[in-house]
Image (spheres, grey):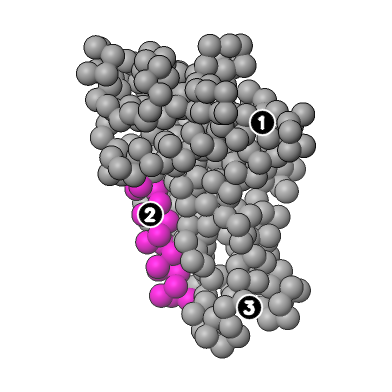
Amino acid sequence: MTANGGVNASGQDIAQLVRCFAVELGADGAVFHRPDPLGQAMAAWSAGSTPAEDVVRELAPYGSSALEQAGAFIGRPPAGANGGWLTLAVGAPVRSPSGVEGALLAGFSKPPEQAEDVLQWTASAYAGAAALALRDSEFLRALVRASRYDELTGLLNYAALRRTLEDEVERAERHARPLSCCFVDLDNFKEINDGFGHEFGNRALAASGLALRRVLRVSDSVGRYGGDEFVALMPETGATDAAAVAARIRDAIAARSLEDLGREVSASCGVAGWAPGRSAADLLEDADRALAEAKARGTGVVVSQESPTTSHQAEHRGRFGRAQGLVR
């Protein structure tokens, strides 16, 4: 136990924090390192291997944050999670009242989108959180949840959703498996806010989030893209089956809003199926275009023309069809 009544964080708890740190930065991987068995267990997460461990070991003795070209920092570029060379490393020491306990570091195989001062500020903020979390797992779990989930709806937030999308497309590409994306947008949401107030609008968003979770399987992922827009990712699901799920999503949102708010809220859905060679951004754009078409037509659900053909889906449905019995 800790002095404030919390429980010391485990390696698994810290690994969750490290993963959130990597997602926040859009890094290829991140590690926490300190020279004891617990610290070594914490240095666990990356996209495929632990990148830049040598950089971490070099960072801690400095006692200050560092953002360096990785090759210059340790004399040679360390291997990245995907087999390429890391080009940049950002990190910060994890301090406690007794001194520096280790280092938190992320590595990039290509130039990051954020400015250097933002990267370094984020590393320092997470290092401070890690120092507290080492002594209080309850604090850590609340922090991890806040960094990954949207507070209003309980769904994945934008950053976590985008990272999950990248991971799912990479998995579909690697294993030649189907994957579908459904873009969901509440209809006339501005009029709802203007007519009934923003608190009512927030309740409509929360009800929609609950409806989405109840329709989708445990193996699916769903997040709040922004405003009144949501994105559902359905592995092992072709576009035709995903369109049927989208129709259920619309029904569930309407029913849940009527039950919780006394007013039915409708939604439009754009569905896209992943095809070989298509990127995560392509899949999302395909679903977004289908959503715009559904809005324009007023048809509720539209499947992207870029999705694999229906005959192709039917041919593979026996092997790749959407598994039943995994619905939340």
Q: CA distance from mark 3 to mark 1?
A: 40 Å
Query: Is residue 224 left or right of 59 when viewed as pictured?
Result: right
Q: Dividing the picture into quarters, in which one does residue 210 lie?
A: bottom right
User: Which one is earlier in the sequence, the residue at label 3 or at label 1?
Assistant: 1
> Which region is colored magenta?
281-298
Image location (x, y in percent) of residue 61: 40, 17
Q: Is residue 248 visible in the rendered structure shown here?
A: no
The residue labelled by disc 1 is: 135
Q: Label 2 crowding class (10 Å Cα cut-off): few <14, some 14-19, many 20+?
A: many
Nearest the camera: 293 or 35? 35
Where disc 2 sits, the SS reads helix
Where disc 3 sits, the SS reads helix
Q: Is residue 76 visible in the rendered structure shown here?
A: yes
The residue labelled by disc 2 is: 286
Residue, far bottom: 195
Judged by depth in the image, the label closer to the viewer, 3 or 1, is: 1
Q: Which residue shows up at 68% across the image and 35% down it? A: 136
Main secondary structure along the magenta-highlighted residues: helix
Q: Which amino acid is tagged 2?
A: Asp
Q: Which residue shows up at 42% across the image and 56% down it? A: 287
Q: Which residue shows up at 46% across the image and 40% down it? A: 125
Query: Is residue 62 left or right of 74 when viewed as pictured?
Result: right
Judged by depth in the image, the label closer to the viewer, 3 or 2, is: 3
User: Which one is earlier in the sequence, the residue at label 1 or at label 2?
Assistant: 1
Image location (x, y in percent) of residue 237: 55, 43
Assign the N terminus to one quadrant of the image: top right
Nearest the camera: 101 or 78? 101
